Amino acid sequence: MIEYYANDKNGNLIPVNAPQQDCWINVERPTHDEISQLAHRYNFPETYISAILDDRENSRVDGIDPQRPERPLHLLLQFPKYEVSPLGYLSFTTFPFSFILTDSAVITVSKQPATFINDFIMNPDNATIRIADRQDFILRFGWYIAHSFVHALSLSERETTSLERELTTATRNEQIYKIMKLQKSLVLFDSALKDNRPILDQISSAQDYFNGPHFHELLAQIMIETDQAQSMTIIQNNILEQYSNMVSSVVSNNLNEVMKLLTSVTLIMTIPTIVGGIYGMNVDLPFAHLAHAFSLVMGFTIIVCAITAWILKRHDWF
């Protein structure tokens, strides 16, 4: 799928039907024909686009040459995407996202839907961004990629808080599976952020090539978001490691509490069974001929059960 955007006469970002000078081309799940067409039209290697077809492609930058500024630039970064596991748990994974800068267009390419693209388009602050300022354009886009990690980690933190509440009553292994999914997500986040950060440093050192009007300000904002995401990843991973170490003990302890309660209830319910068994015998028994024999026996049974429950409660067995 290919979408085209351009600035109108007032500078507003609007969709258009065909490519033109200073346009933004957004490509999702490109076919081989689309890859060949774009590579031929804008004179760059097909690998600039086909790289995103590999979900585990590493972040990188190609084509930085201050002596040849007209040469297409390729920038590949990782971005997060949330998904629901077959067991119904929220988890995250990462995918590559490519920027290609040419002398007439900015091309963005992804294999998976990237929600931050809609965030970028719908943000009123970006309504009048000039595509002609291509370097600033991709840096503004880059901030949304960095912020998407922060947003994903906020959702992960919410899941961790929910998991903490569940652990107080957990008696099954579901919480262990949730921890495994969250830890897997954090491992992928840590790897992706570590891949992205050197690329930002490489861009920062290429000031002879990157000379947009807001270059330093935008790059600093991206680095701040990336550093924040890395810190959040480390903190959440440490918390989940603590949970992972204690969850088995918590589940076992909660199960023991349940068994203790069931044992106490069983003990108390045994008393009426014994009394009923005795007075069910077909022989003469005390109080058997009294008019209120049933009430006396029931009252005695209730009193004994209450005393037993009080003793168990006093010793914290109930």
Image (spheres, rainbow, N blue to C red):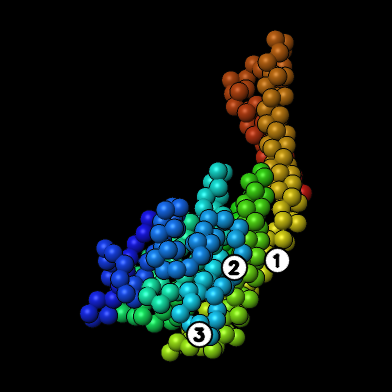
> How many other residues sit within 10 Å of disc 3, few (<14), some (14-19) or many (≥20)?
some
Q: Secondary structure at mark 3?
A: loop
Distance from the alpha carbon under mark 3 to that under mark 1:
37 Å
Q: Secondary structure at mark 2?
A: loop
N-terminal-most mark, 1 or 2? 2
- Mark in the foreground, 3 or 1: 3
Relative to 265, say whether 92 is above or below.
below
Choose between 264 and 130: the one closer to the eye. Answer: 130
Front label number (3 vs 2): 3
Evaluate if marks 3 and 1 touch, with contact meaning CB atoms under 8 Å apart: no
The residue sitting at 62% across, 22% down in the picture is: 293
Q: Which residue is labeled 3 in the image?
A: 210
**Residue under numbered circle 2:** 59
Q: Would residue 190 appear left or right of 111 to someone viewing this image? A: right
Describe residue 278's horizontal placement relative to residue 149 as left or right: right
Report if the CB atoms under discs 3 and 2 are less than 8 Å apart. no
The residue sitting at 48% across, 77% down in the picture is: 71
Residue 18 shows in the view: yes
Q: Quadrant of the N terminus?
A: bottom left
Would residue 211 appear left or right of 167 to someone viewing this image? left
In the displayed orientation, state which residue is furthest to the left: 9
Q: Report crowding for label 2: few under 14, some 14 to 19, many 20 or more residues within 10 A (C-alpha).
A: many
| Amino acid type, residue under disc 3 in the picture | Phe
Task: Specify the amino acid type for callout 2.
Answer: Ser
Residue at 48%, 82% in the rendered image: 69
Residue with the mark numbered 1: 238
Q: Position of residue 223 (x, y in %)?
A: 56, 80
Tell me if label 1 and label 2 are in contact, CB under 8 Å. no
Q: In whole angstroms, how far apart are the C-alphas of marks 3 and 2? A: 18 Å
Q: Position of residue 119 (x, y in %)?
A: 39, 68
Amino acid identity at mark 1? Asn
